[in-house]
Amino acid sequence: EIDRSLVLIKPDGYRRGLTGEVLRRIEAKGYTLVALQVTSATREQLAQHYAEHEGKPFYEPLLEFMSSGPLTAAVIEGHGCIPGFRSLAGATNPTEAAPGSIRGDLGRDWGLAVQQNIVHGSDSPESAAREITIWFPGIAS
Ligand code: CMP
């Protein structure tokens, strides 16, 4: 069984022209792109995607930020790609993310209500299956 993960290149990554750089790192790592789409997230997609964060102080700013422009959704494939992509992404807080990681190399703290940290990656096989359905209905996870 080959693992699949859902990756989002968030609106900050899109605005900053980092989409190609993130995809380059995914491919350079050896993962395969199996689905890719530039899209504008609906409120329903974001509410489903971030259901576990509902009620947290950053929830509404997070949904607002994620609605602030186009984002890129991707399904990537490869053994170990779920923890592997999270390792490529680095820590949630870009200030703490290690250099060499996407957030460590390309991200910073902008002093805003929500961490604008360029990418999202699924944190477990269960999350990946759930998230792939949200962004790519019709694709088997
Ligand atoms: P992500 O991995 O997509 O999941 C939830 C997102 O909320 C996270 O990336 C950040 O963009 C944001 N986030 C998580 N924790 C915080 C926090 N403590 N303060 C602000 N934003 C956060």
Image (spheres, rainbow, N blue to C red):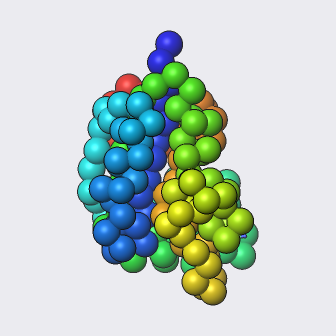
Looking at the image, which is closer to me, 77 or 24?
24
Q: Quadrant of the C terminus?
A: top left
Q: How many marks?
A: 0
* Residue drawn at (57%, 54%) of the image: 100
As drawn, the residue found furthest toward the top would be 1
Q: Quadrant of ligand 1?
A: bottom right
As drawn, the residue found furthest toward the front would be 100
Q: Is residue 39 positioned above or below 111 on the image?
A: above
- Does residue 66 show up? yes
Q: Is residue 28 positioned above or below 66 on the image?
A: above
Q: Quadrant of residue 74?
A: top left
Q: Is residue 115 positioned above or below 82 on the image?
A: below
* Residue drawn at (57%, 36%) of the image: 84
* Residue 130 placement (x, y as % from top left): 52, 38
Compared across the picture, whether 20 is left or right of 64 comes to left
Looking at the image, which is closer to me, 71 or 13?
13
* Residue 25 placement (x, y as % from top left): 41, 46
Q: Is residue 124 positioned above or below 56 on the image?
A: above
Looking at the image, which is closer to me, 113 or 55?
113
Q: Quadrant of residue 137?
A: top left
Q: Quadrant of residue 60?
A: bottom right
Compared across the picture, whether 51 is left or right of 76 comes to right
- Does residue 127 show up? no
* Residue 101 placement (x, y as % from top left): 57, 54
* Residue 83 placement (x, y as % from top left): 62, 36
Compared across the picture, whether 103 is left or right of 16 comes to right
As drawn, the residue found furthest toward the bottom would be 111
* Residue drawn at (28%, 44%) of the image: 36
